[in-house]
Image (cartoon, rainbow, N blue to C red):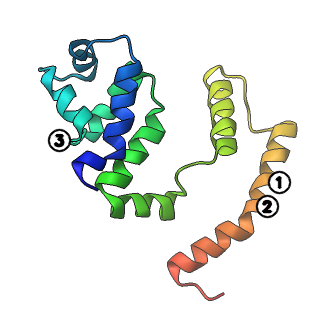
Amino acid sequence: MSANHSLVAKVLSDAIEASDLTQREIAAHAGFNHSNIISMLKSGETRIPLDRIPALSTALNLDQQKFLLQAIEEYHPNVHQVLVDVLGLPLSDAETTILGMYRMAALRGEIEVTGPFGRAFESLLELAAPTANTLLRDCDGAPT
């Protein structure tokens, strides 16, 4: 994808235009020493360093995971394909919601994988087991 047709640059540019922050403020939030880099990133002249995506996303109210995966897909399509194949990324909206709820409950110390939740979780794992077993078998070459 050429610099003029970079989807990542377009997403960044749109977010910057929608933001109340100046390019100098955005650069500072993302840890860049010079604000002119923001113009270069916006135009697609320069790729966004992957390690700066979390800070840029936070400053510009972008979904960090989606923006990062979008950048990886555009800049490193082979790596993106491995992430999709091996890790099953990106997560579906339902998976993201469930994971978010679990993390919030775990952070508050309000969740234990016992009792009714533990039984429901075990049932969910049992439902996933045939798929997981097939994946493991395919990966390690075990007979089917």
Instruction: Work out which quarter of the rendered image holds the N terminus and state it.
Output: bottom left
Distance, label 1 to label 2, CA atoms, is: 6 Å
* Residue 17 % position (x, y): 36, 21
**Mark 2 lies on residue:** 127
Toward the viewer: 138 or 88?
88
* Residue corresponding to mark 3: 45
Q: CA distance from mark 3 to mark 1?
A: 50 Å
Viewer-side residue, 117 vs 66 = 66
| Secondary structure found at label 1 | helix
Foreground of the two, 134 or 84: 84
Question: Which residue in the structure is indicated by mark 1?
Answer: 123
Q: Along the polypeptide, which appears first: circle 3 or circle 2?
A: 3
Q: Amino acid at mark 1?
A: Ser
The type of residue carrying mark 3 is: Glu
Q: Amino acid at mark 2?
A: Leu
Residue 125: x and y, percent? 74, 56
Instruction: Find the distance from the CA under tag 3 to the CA under tag 2.
Output: 48 Å
